[in-house]
Amino acid sequence: MTAIFVLTARQLAGSRRVWLVLALVALPVLAAVLFHVGETTTTNARFADNVTTTLIASGILPLVMLLFATSAFGNELVDRTLGYLALKPLARWRIVLPKLAAAFFVGGVPVAASGFVAVALVDGGGLRGALATGLGLLVGAAAYAAIFTWAGLASRHALLLGLVYVFVWEATLAAYLDGVRFLSIRRYTLGLIHGLDEARLARIDDPLSSGAAILAAALVVGAFTALTVRKLVRMDVP
Amino acid sequence: MNGEPAPTIEVEGVSKWFGGVVAVSDVSLVVEPGVTALLGPNGAGKTTLLRTIGGLTLPSEGTVTVFGEPIRRNPGLYRRIGYMPEHEAVYDFLTGRQFVELGARLQGVDDLDAAVGRAIETVDLVKDQDRRLRGYSRGMRQRMRLAATLVHDPPLLVLDEPLSGTDPAQRLHLRDVIRRLAGEGRTVLVSSHILEEVDQLADRIHLMVSGKLAASGDYRAIRLKLNDRPFVVRIDCANARALAAGLLRVDAVESVEVADDGALRVRSRDVSSLQRSLPAIARELDIRLSRVEPLDDSLESVFEYLATGTGR
């Protein structure tokens, strides 16, 4: 599985979109630096919360994971190289798991690191809030990776579907409709950050407990990984 | 039980359609050790059939077994199969050697370095193995893909258009490699759309046209069928009517037409007889020939004749 992980990580990290992603990942850190050097009436905690909710959890994290995870299989479907993996004596889950891990590693880890550094800078070196942010973002990244990796294999319009999920479902429907608000990875991410450090994100409405957030994210990862394996078993490989 | 070994590949009543388009229609064949060629024009269904044999595509109807086992949902079988797809896409950010190594690792090859070195040596690309694939010519890429296909030393090789994109020297070399691999007891199934390409290469040919199996046999049998078909030749000359009268005396000539542009269209069933008679008649009548061109010698026409008994 290491060979497929390394192959996929090189594919993803070598694409042109990595420059866009690096720019996105640098934004929270840049915002934190500007907050320190500039003069503002906003408190440190409030600024850190705004960066986490508005900039990272609602925009950068889902966008970065969308770009990388949909490409984990999507690139190979487009250039027809998936056969080089599918024609090997490997159970399909042994192809899916390393690809999922590569998307998580290449996309999720830099975003989580960016969130950690930004919050640490804003908090003046305090580590608890920064660690909570980093861990929450890592869990969110894993869930996004599972959904978008499946979408990249299942649909030619995965990017569009992903954008609809992030900006229509999560940003509007799940944010305002009580009945579906638990079907939002953004809420799992923010709920976990708050659960790990109650001083963070105190203003969000009815946050999930950290246990519920981890359980929900784990269910999403498990379900969508299973769907991806099932799809790869049944599909015609181009 | 008659004691004969089971064929390496058994295709039984396989059809494959995509929406309303039938790509393969009720094909049954067996493939045994040695080199077998799947021949046919572009769009005949060769690649779809090979993809079905390789388990990449699920047949709409029929069954495929390889070494007596179903190929779909049976990844363990790929240890015994080397499959080279038709399209030339590769992970072009890898070097040639890394690409072959990847195949070897995923196949779980024990002595990786030795196996990779041997495979690259077989396709004669040792000097270029550390260059990135994106800098390779089409032929070099094709040969490195072959190296990755045979790195785990499989008893069955399925090669979709393996000679495509290679120059004449590489073509001869690859042909020798394929013959040698088959000579060591392997089963090699290759596809091609060029009849002459499979001469000297394949022990047995399955001819596909419009998704159907049109003929099977060795190269000689297929060639004889081709020579037996009627064909049309266009002849441009100074005195078309006199030459037409002369040609009609030749038994092999079925009809001669003088077209509006003054050219002759000669229909015959015996290529070699017409080839011998035409210069003799032209000399006898003192007619200068400016152009002699077969009109329907395209592969599609040849294959259509073999499939349906009527040329275009």
Image (cartoon, coloured by chain):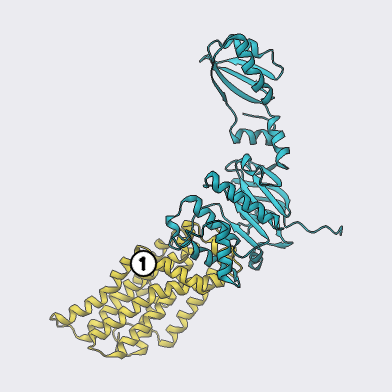
Q: Is B220 rendered above or below residue B37?
A: above
Near-viewer residue (B174 or A67) = B174
User: Which element type, helix, strand or loop, lies under badge 1?
Assistant: helix
Near-viewer residue (B189 or A161) = B189
Residue placed furthest toward the right: B2
Residue placed furthest toward the left: A39
Residue B302 rendering spot, x and y as whole percentages: 64, 34
Left or right: residue A174 compared with residue B113: left
Quarter-of-image position of residue A201? bottom left
Residue designated by label 1: A168
Dot 1: few (<14), some (14–19), or many (≥20) neighbours within 10 Å? few
Chain cyan in the figure, letter? B
Left or right: residue B189 compared with residue B164: right
Quarter-of-image position of residue A141? bottom left
Quarter-of-image position of residue A68? bottom left
Residue B70 rendering spot, x and y as whole percentages: 70, 62
Residue A51 rendering spot, x and y as whole percentages: 26, 78
Near-viewer residue (A79 or B171) = B171
Q: Residue at x 69, y 15 (%)?
A: B250
Q: Mark 1 lies on which chain?
A: A
Q: Is A105 rendered above or below residue B56?
A: below
* Type of amino acid at the residue the image marks with label 1: Val
Q: Is there any visible trace of residue B190 in the rendered image?
A: yes
Q: Which residue is drawn at 46% across and 71% down?
A: A6
Chain yellow in the figure, letter? A
Query: Which image quadrant: the N terminus of chain B?
Result: bottom right
Q: Is B268 rendered above or below residue A98?
A: above
Left or right: residue A47 compared with residue B251: left
Give the total number of marks visible in the rendering: 1
Query: Which image quadrant: the C terminus of chain B?
Result: top right
Residue B87 rendering spot, x and y as whole percentages: 52, 52
Q: Is there any visible trace of residue A238 in the rendered image?
A: no
